[in-house]
Image (cartoon, grey):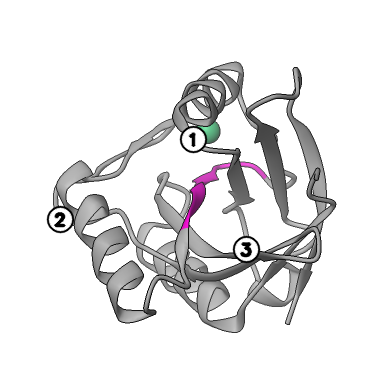
Amino acid sequence: MPIKQVVYSREALNTFESEINEFGIIETGGVLMGYVKDETVHVIKASDGGPDAIHEDVYFRADPNYIDMFIDVEYANSGGKLRYLGEWHTHSQIIPEPSPKDLNSLYEIAESADDFCLLLIIGAINFKVDEFINRSITVIKHKHLKSPFSLSSQVF
Ligand SMILES: [Zn+2]
């Protein structure tokens, strides 16, 4: 059952906005958590990168221990409703595009996932949260489909 669209919560958007306010056009990011219903991915929560994240002009790596803890805590607090969906990070672009490196890491994560993995890239240059839809791209890689493709996104 391929997923056709992704819906982002206001809470997730608030995390993106406050991270971009903090880091500007230096890359930042984290993980996405939520659930799948009716061929739609609902992203409910997004993490920041954590205390040992690496933020550079064209490189970001989240703090692995912090991310593992975030996933475990959110999973437990939601009674297992919220699961890991994928990753997000910013680019110093207006209209963001995933790099070849980003797509490679998406392939790798999707390979070890049960079904699929999401990658959200947000353009951090002059970012305004009201323009999130036009200033971001969400790519999905299904484990059993050859190529990733971009999803249409909405905010609720
Ligand atoms: Zn990237």
Residues rendered magenta in the picture: 84-93
Beta carbon at label 1 within 8 Å of ligand 1: no
Q: Does the magenta segment cover residue 88?
A: yes
Real-space Cα separation, disc 1 to disc 2, in angstroms: 25 Å
Beta carbon at label 3 within 8 Å of ligand 1: no
Real-space Cα separation, disc 2 to disc 3, in angstroms: 23 Å
Q: Residue at x 80, y 48 (%)?
A: 151
Q: Main secondary structure of the magenta part?
A: strand
Marks 1 & 3, CB-CB < 8 Å contact = no
Query: In the shown orientation, is residue 72 left or right of residue 11?
Result: left
Q: Is residue 138 above or below residue 135?
A: above
Residue 127: mark: 3
Q: Secondary structure at mark 1?
A: loop
Beta carbon at label 2 within 8 Å of ligand 1: no
Q: Nearer the viewer, mark 1 or mark 3?
A: 1
Residue 51: mark: 2
The kind of residue on which mark 1 rests is Ala
Foreground pick, 90 / 112? 112
Please tell me which of labels 1 and 2 falls first in the chain.
2
Q: Residue at x 46, y 69 (%)?
A: 82
Q: Secondary structure at mark 2?
A: loop
Whole-percent x, y for residue 22 in the image: 35, 66
Please tell me which of labels 2 and 3 falls first in the chain.
2
The kind of residue on which mark 3 rests is Phe
For residue 70, which quarter of the picture? bottom left
Query: In the shown orientation, is residue 75 left or right of residue 152?
Result: left
Residue 113: mark: 1
Whole-percent x, y for residue 50 in the image: 22, 56
Q: Does the magenta segment cover residue 28?
A: no
